[in-house]
């Protein structure tokens, strides 16, 4: 009887969450999967069961080059946000001693994020442009005599904006992990004769792994699905998977977009699974 | 015009066996006089009481969704017009997928070709439109003047009419049922920065001139971009087309191959998708030659930066838009919509659009609302005698300026191709994506 009641109450308690997941995640996802097998023409989508969308998608060299490009952006962004995120979190967690200052400096990190994503991105454009602030400064200082063209509308610009936009996603979870590290472990390492670098390598990095993994998941999933940064910062000259989907939606090619979305979802899930294989977030939280 | 008058007119027309055209012409002349005398009351009196409660929701591309128009509608006709501006892709999407979210669709003709067959709109009975007769022949039979040649692409008249009130089949000749009433159109060409280019630009081929390496741009809306690309390839002599508005797979492949080579060689600085992007690229000097829209050129110039809408020897790529009715409209709202559409053609909006550098679909009515100098500058290609003001009163051109490309007839008369949707649209979009990803 008692276990029946508790069973019932636990079912009752998970119902809201289950409903939310069902309505906002499972049903839309299933719809996307279903639509990805439909046919379409210029202005209609036609219920059907065809593999043409996938055939074209997986058979086209464009898809492969787009995926390669997207993975390149994701990998570069990941490396730079990790380096920056880890350094910033390390500084906050271990060099700033007072909790007040930790909170203040942490808030300082978040200030740029009070403005809109798009604004932060667009503000790079006049800065990096051919006649932009940076190029004018470099020319006036006599460092270069021709404006540097690669600064804007290039892969460099895309990765720069991505790093700028998403570094905080790396800082927060790593900082969180680091704050949980028992300080006596570090003292013990020092007492045992470990150098600063050895402590970092054998104590701090392994114990920050869950934070690194969570941050990596955030950054990689966001960059893999991004379309607006790529469009604006590459001047529309580079493609990403997200941009491809957005273009297809714009042209009313919903089934093609759905197929791309399914393939992207599977790709990202594989990456996340691989990350979770490397780091067991549950065990280390 | 009251109901009685309308009826009597109609009776006379039937009795004397006058053709519908002839009747409309007569009615239009009467209406013209009515407009002239300021005696335009518009709608039948039975509606007059409650028409003020009507709200019509119009959505469309930014170019003609002008708040000033909504204000003037309220003033002249009494009802409320709500406007939503979207980009052309979103407009097409919404017209098809959310048919109850709008009453009036303001779309381009090539979008109409995609959208109208979906059955979410209803054609208009042209006999209900007093100003029908003033609509430029360009939209009726495709010929600006009797001896002009019909341009390639989705020329408006080819998707302007359907067979009947419930039909979604486009008619090959004008019928009583019009899909869109034309509102706005223009001839597009390349925009250049004459201060940063030291030679004459005369051909579309100049877009891919290596002299402008890293300083060129093309618009990244596949159905329009492919046209500009085709104009370029044809001008270069790289590809010959049967119909640029409806290319074969082979023609598409060749065109994209030329563009991909140019892209790989670093010809393009960026691709743009929105009006603002094109203005910024040009104004900042990132780009010195690119596909452009007329008001974008004006926007660059209004910043005090030299920018020319360069006429080219191969001709223009034209586009046109119109307003159409949602399928669900009926009763009072439908009457109000007809009143609105008729009013649109009656001249005030036309003059407003002409002053922005677009063209009115009924130039004759617009003329009444423009000064002689304005008409001369915008429509006749004459040098401005005084400063030319934009509709909101800003100086657009100083006295003495001449419009790039000249008169209405010169510009609209040398259209090489209209914006279009191709039969091979799916293939074209895929190839275009290859170009962007290359």
Image (cartoon, coloured by chain):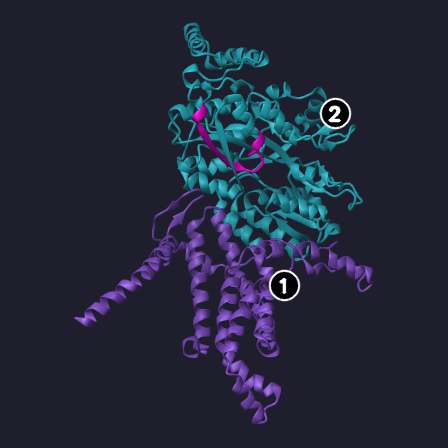
Chain bearing mark 1: A
Q: In the image, what residue occupies the spot 46% across and 74% down?
A: A275
Q: From the image, state the color of chain B.
A: cyan
Mark 2, secondary structure of its residue = loop
Q: Residue furthest left?
A: A1
Residue at the image point whose x is 53% and y is 41% from the top:
B88
Would residue B412 be counted in the magenta stretch? no
Horizontal and vertical percent position of residue A148: 74, 60
Q: Which residue is mark 2?
A: B382
Q: Quadrant of residue B362?
A: top right
- Tag 1 near tag 2, CB within 8 Å: no
One can see residue B74 in this view: yes
* Residue span colored magenta: B52-68
Q: Disc 2 sits on a residue from what chain? A: B
Residue B310 image point, x, y percent: 71, 38
Q: Is residue B313 above or below residue B374?
A: below
Q: Nearer the viewer, residue B124 or B87?
A: B87
Q: CA distance from mark 1 to mark 2?
A: 50 Å
Residue tagged by mark 1?
A160
Where does residue B71 sit, x and y in percent of width and height?
55, 28
Identified at 46% across, 61% down, the residue is: A264
The residue located at (76%, 26%) in the rendering is B384
Q: Residue furthest bottom?
A: A192
For residue A22, above or below residue B103: below
The reply to whether residue B177 is visible in this rendering is no
Name chain A's colour. Answer: purple
Tag nearer the camera, 1 or 2: 1
């Amino acid at each position: 009887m008692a276990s029946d009641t508790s069973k019932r109450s636990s079912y009752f308690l998970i119902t809201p969450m289950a409903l939310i997941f069902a309505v906002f995640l499972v049903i839309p996802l299933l719809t996307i999967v279903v639509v990805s097998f439909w046919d379409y023409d210029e202005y209609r989508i036609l219920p059907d069961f065809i593999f043409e969308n996938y055939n074209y998608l997986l058979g086209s060299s464009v898809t492969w080059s787009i995926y390669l490009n997207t993975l390149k952006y994701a990998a570069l962004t990941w490396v730079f946000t990790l380096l920056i995120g880890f350094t910033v979190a390390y500084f906050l967690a271990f060099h700033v001693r007072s909790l007040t200052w930790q909170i203040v400096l942490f808030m300082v990190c978040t200030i740029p994020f009070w403005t809109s994503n798009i604004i932060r991105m667009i503000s790079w454009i006049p800065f990096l442009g051919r006649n932009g602030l940076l190029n004018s400064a470099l020319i006036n200082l006599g460092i270069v005599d021709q404006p540097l063209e690669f600064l804007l509308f290039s892969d460099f610009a895309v990765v720069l904006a991505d790093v700028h936009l998403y570094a905080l996603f790396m800082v927060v979870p790593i900082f969180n992990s680091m704050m949980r590290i028992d300080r006596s472990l570090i003292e013990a390492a020092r007492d045992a004769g470990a150098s600063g670098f050895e402590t970092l390598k054998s104590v701090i990095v392994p114990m920050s792994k869950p934070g690194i993994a969570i941050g990596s998941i955030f950054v990689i999933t966001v960059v893999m699905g991004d379309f607006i940064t790529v469009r604006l910062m590459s001047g529309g000259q580079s493609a990403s998977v997200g941009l491809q989907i957005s273009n297809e939606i714009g042209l009313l090619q919903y089934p093609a977009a759905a197929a791309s979305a399914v393939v992207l979802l599977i790709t990202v899930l594989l990456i996340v699974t691989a990350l979770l294989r490397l780091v067991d977030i549950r065990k280390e939280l | 015009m009251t109901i009685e008058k309308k009826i009597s007119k109609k009776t006379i027309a039937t009795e004397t066996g006058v053709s519908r055209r002839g009747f409309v012409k007569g009615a239009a002349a009467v209406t013209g006089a009515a407009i002239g005398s300021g005696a335009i009351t518009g709608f039948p009196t039975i509606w007059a009481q409650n028409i003020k409660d009507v709200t019509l929701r119009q959505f469309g591309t930014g170019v003609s969704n002008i708040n000033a128009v909504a204000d003037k509608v309220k003033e002249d006709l009494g009802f409320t017009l709500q406007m939503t501006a979207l980009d052309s892709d979103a407009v097409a999407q919404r017209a098809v997928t959310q048919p109850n979210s709008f009453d009036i669709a303001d779309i381009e003709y090539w979008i109409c070709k995609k959208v109208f067959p979906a059955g979410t709109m209803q054609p208009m009975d042209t006999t209900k439109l007093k100003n029908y007769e003033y609509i430029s022949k360009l939209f009726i039979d495709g010929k600006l003047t009797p001896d002009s040649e019909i341009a390639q692409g989705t020329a408006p008249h080819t998707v302007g009419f359907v067979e009947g009130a419930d039909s979604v089949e486009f008619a090959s000749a004008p019928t009583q049922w019009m899909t869109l009433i034309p509102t706005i159109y223009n001839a597009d060409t390349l925009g250049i920065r004459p201060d940063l280019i030291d030679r004459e630009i005369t051909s579309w081929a100049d877009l891919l001139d290596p002299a402008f390496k890293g300083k060129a741009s093309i618009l990244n809306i596949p159905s329009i971009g492919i046209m500009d690309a085709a104009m370029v390839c044809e001008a270069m002599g790289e590809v010959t087309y049967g119909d640029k508005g409806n290319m074969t797979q082979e023609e598409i492949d060749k065109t994209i191959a030329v563009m991909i080579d140019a892209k790989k060689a670093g010809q393009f600085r960026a691709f743009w998708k929105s009006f603002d992007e094109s203005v910024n690229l040009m104004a900042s000097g990132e780009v010195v030659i690119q596909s452009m829209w007329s008001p974008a050129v004006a926007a660059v110039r209004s910043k005090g930066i030299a920018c020319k809408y360069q006429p080219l020897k191969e001709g223009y790529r034209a586009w046109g838009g119109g307003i159409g009715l949602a399928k669900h409209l009926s009763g009072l709202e439908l009457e109000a919509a007809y009143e609105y559409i008729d009013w649109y053609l009656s001249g005030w909006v036309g003059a407003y659009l002409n002053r922005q550098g677009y063209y009115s679909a009924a130039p004759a009515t617009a003329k009444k609302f423009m000064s002689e100098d304005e008409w001369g500058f915008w429509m006749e290609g004459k040098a401005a005698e005084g400063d030319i003001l934009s509709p909101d009163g800003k100086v657009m051109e100083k006295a003495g300026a001449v419009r790039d490309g000249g008169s209405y007839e010169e510009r609209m008369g040398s259209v090489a191709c209209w914006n279009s949707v191709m039969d091979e649209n799916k293939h074209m979009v895929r190839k275009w994506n290859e170009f962007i990803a290359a």
